[in-house]
Amino acid sequence: MSDTFNPAIPTTSNDGKSTGRFGYRTPAEEVVTELGIDLSDRVAIITGASSGLGQETARVLALKGARIILAIRNLEAGQKVAQEIQQSTGNTKIEAMLVDLTSLKSIKEFADTFLAKKLPLNLLVNNAGVMANPTRETTADGFEMQFGTNHLGHFYLTQLLTPALVAAAPSRVVAVSSLGHTFSPVVFDDINWEKSYDRWLAYGHSKTANALFALELNKRLSPKGVIAVSLHPGGAATNLSRHIPRDYAISQGWMNEDGTMNSVFKTVEQCSSTTVYCAIAPEVLEHGGAYFEDCNLGVPAPHASDPQAAAKLWEVSEKLISNALKQ
């Protein structure tokens, strides 16, 4: 299957400038230091926290004392990261727990195990993701891989953990979307890309779903003290880009011939700053359902901020998961 869509260099709708509290390239540790909030009484679950942005988000929140659950699919790698964070921060309240977001069974097992701990859940960061799978693949439950992992897996996880989020209110759900949401709206008439598959359009479809999910989740849970937001972290070279060949990255202008990244890209430390900001900044509480970039309110594409599409996606997602669980 060939791609019909070629994305531009991933940057920001703010054109590399931030008009907010922090700059475009402010590292996450500087954000958490400047905010100066003690997190020693808070519990956070971060998916995809064994590498990249998830790992850095966990490390930075751990610096302020938060109890962190690294929700990861490779337990050995997660345990190693947990030890590294404990050693570098002095925070021993770091734990790795197994969850495979491509499996509803695994997600249910993770949620049951966490809920059995009787812990509050102050923060859920839906960070894990896959990007630009070159061919159409499916999850264990038959969903297209990008939509199934990036959206449906997190949708089901959040639903199962909602009792703990409500019990810990005020609490937050942070959905890591992407500027890639501009590539495509949610394609409701081919939700699993069975008719035609394009890796970038399918990725955009899943990232739009992240933003719409946060919008509808906030509508449903904010009266109970749970707010939800989505964000674009910025472009960085992480494991997320593992499906992008070097030659392709060079041809798109993302990578230079010498292997260095285009200067518009951020470091992992810089890309993690908006997630951390959304997770703990007090002013974010005033903007439930919003989309953030560069530690500032962003401007999503109209199809990613449509409340009717958000409500429809919720209904479709519930039906897809319900049908899968019956099989």
Image (spheres, rainbow, N blue to C red):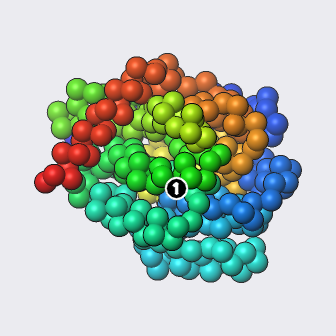
* x, y percent for residue 327: 13, 54
Tag count: 1
Most foreground residue, 7 or 52? 52
Callout 1: helix, strand or loop? helix
Most foreground residue, 132 or 212? 212
**Residue 208's image quarter?**
top left
Seen in the image, is 200 located left or right of residue 246?
left
**Residue beneath the point at 61% across and 53% down:** 168
- Is there any visible trace of residue 232 in the rendered image? no
Under mark 1, the amino acid is Ala
* x, y percent for residue 39: 75, 60
Residue with the mark numbered 1: 164
- Is there any visible trace of residue 126 in the rendered image? yes
* x, y percent for residue 143: 24, 47
The vertical placement of 261 against 218, above or below, is below
**Residue beneath the point at 54% across and 48% down:** 166
* x, y percent for residue 227: 59, 39
